[in-house]
Image (cartoon, helix red, strand yellow):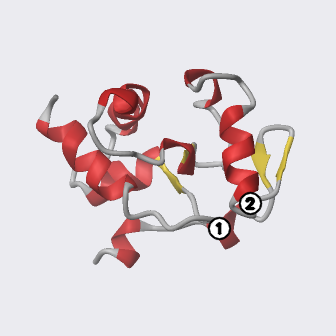
Amino acid sequence: MSDFFSKVYEVVQQIPPGRVTSYGAIASYLGTAGSARMVGWAMNASHSYPEFVPAHRVVNRNGLLTGKYHFDTPDAMKELLENEGVKIKEDQIIHFKKHFWDPAKELG
């Protein structure tokens, strides 16, 4: 497991239920702006991490569920978010700004 992936998982594990962040926000917080795609790769590999990583809380910068095909079923990501009170329409989070959790602000 790469050190970068471990750092990504540490951030994602701190996202509260009902909140979401973006791949780019995590990359920026880690000081690697421009590596949002690597954050996505980390999310794709998170199922093999020994601790639970709530990867369903990481979406693209527009609130789209772009990672949904990396879950057990294409609807699993949506269902997990909806169970936390996040409303979704056509794979996009409704009121995205309200649910957005910025690690730079929240974790300092």
Q: Is residue 73 left or right of residue 38?
A: right
| Residue 40 spot, x, y in % from top left | 42, 32
Q: Is residue 98 left or right of residue 33?
A: right
Which residue is at 38% across, 64% downward?
14
Q: Amino acid at mark 1?
A: His
Q: Which mark is residue 108?
A: none
State the SS at label 2.
loop
Which residue is at 20% across, 43% downward?
6
| Residue 108 spot, x, y in % from top left | 28, 78
Which residue is at 73% across, 55% downward?
83
The residue pinned by badge 2 equals 86
Q: Nearer the viewer, mark 2 or mark 1?
A: 2
Q: Amino acid at mark 2?
A: Val
Note whether 105 is above or below 50 in the view shown: below
Rendered-image quadrant of the N terminus: top left
How crowded is the residue under tag 1: few (<14 C-alpha within 10 Å), some, or many (20+)? many
How crowded is the residue under tag 2: few (<14 C-alpha within 10 Å), some, or many (20+)? many
Q: Is residue 36 left or right of residue 3?
A: right
Note whether 59 is above or below 106 in the view shown: above
The residue pinned by badge 1 equals 99
Which residue is at 35% across, 70% downward?
104
Q: Is residue 104 left or right of residue 17?
A: left
| Residue 94 spot, x, y in % from top left | 81, 58
- Residue lying at the far right of the rendered structure: 89
